[in-house]
Image (cartoon, grey):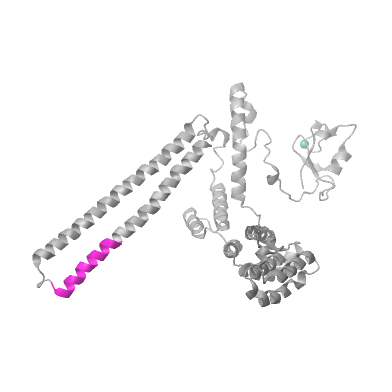
Amino acid sequence: MEQCACVERELEKVLHRFVMYGHQSEERLDELLRSVCEIRGQLVAFGVQDADLSVLSQTMAQCCKNIKETVQMLASRHKDIHGSVSKVGKAIDRVRTGSSANFDAEISAVVAETVWDTPERQKYLSETIVEHLYRQGMLSVAEDLCQESGVVIDMSMKQPFLELNRILEALRMQDLRPALEWAVTNRQRLLDLNSSLEFKLHRLYFISLLSGGIGNQMEALQYARHFQPFASQHQRDIQILMGSLVYLRHGIENSPYRGLLETNQWAEICNIFTRDACALLGLSVESPLSVSFASGCMALPVLMNIKQVIEQRQCSGVWTHKDELPIEIDLGKKCWYHSVFACPILRQQTSESNPPMKLICGHVISRDALNKLTNAGKLKCPYCPMEQNPSHAKQIYF
Ligand SMILES: [Zn+2]
């Protein structure tokens, strides 16, 4: 960790130098440009014939000298920056080869070489990266990748991301209007999802009026009518907002309602908007690429360990199917997904009271089916058919 911090420090130095270099070179170039323009102006004004030639040549020589010096100075500073960049490289090398060995250079043994070897698979990868870039709002990079990889993205797939980004960008600048417009347009669908996004946006708009002080009193009172459709569901919240109006003259920040002005509400509304808008548009909240990447980061150390054990014990036959992992890797609760599962035995959708259960062999059936199939403490999987202890089956979470 210390070594990583060291890399960060070196990186900051380089970035600082880059910025300084930019400012300096701009300043010096502006200065040169000014003096050259001045000389040209004088020449135009007085004419070459009338000018004192010795003075003129002196001025020109001085000007050339200045230009040369500036170029040399900029070149040598540029060289210095190169030095700092290579220092970052060395710092990274130290992390790789240091005693703690944070980087393992040889990871090919846990990756199947054939993973990306068909054009179709490469296309999937490019599409996933493009989708990720759209999600991040990096539109021009996504367009470039599309062009270079030959991936064609349908406009209908792109549109929701563009809109989400436009609204989120505004929210980050504390501009609620685009989000409010979107929420009002999609009011019914949001309510169907049990979302309180629209109310929370109106609430925040009201609070931003409150923070403007007594001058906004009339506007705040008028805006309060937007709460009317939410009166029954958010009664308590609305009472608090209306109560705060009493303190508007003295400033909400000095009142018992100062909690309303907490600044983390903006980050929170961005999260709520992303979550609810993604749910409404049928998109996952997180990009599939970042989820896969994060899972890979968690799984890699475990796989590297297994590889080592397999090599040491010389039992190379254990892990021959590279498209299947040799053991189950716990990725934490965050990676438990709540997809719909229909029991193949009872042909009904599983629920919290009858959750899907994973058998030792890897087949999944509902708990009711598991209980029905259990006979004298033993269970024969209806698919493979491995005989096993039903108490070893593991619940898959909803
Ligand atoms: Zn089975």
Residue 278: within the magenta?
no
* Residue 282 position within the rendered picture, expressed as x and y whole percent measured from the top left: 68, 59
Residue 105 vertical placement versus 8 (above, below) = above
Query: In which quarter of the view is residue 257 placed?
Result: bottom right
User: Number of labelled discs?
Assistant: 0
Which residue corresponds to the image point at 36% horizontal and 55% vertical from the top-left?
Answer: 22
* Residue 21 position within the rendered picture, expressed as x and y whole percent measured from the top left: 35, 53
Give the side of residue 278 with respect to residue 127, left or right. Answer: right
Dominant secondary structure of the residues highlighted in magenta in the image:
helix
Give the side of residue 218 with respect to residue 57, left or right. Answer: right
Give the side of residue 331 with respect to residue 127, left or right. Answer: right
Which residue corresponds to the image point at 71% horizontal and 48% vertical from the top-left?
Answer: 337
Q: Which residues are magenta?
A: 30-47
* Residue 183 position within the rendered picture, expressed as x and y whole percent measured from the top left: 68, 68
Residue 128 vertical placement versus 30 (above, below) = above
Q: Nearer the viewer, residue 348 or 258?
A: 258
* Residue 112 position within the rendered picture, expressed as x and y whole percent measured from the top left: 57, 37
Q: Nearer the viewer, residue 146 or 183?
A: 183
Which residue corresponds to the image point at 44% horizontal and 42% vertical from the top-left?
Answer: 10
Which residue corresponds to the image point at 46% horizontal and 43% vertical from the top-left?
Answer: 9
Query: In which quarter of the view is residue 231 placed?
Result: bottom right
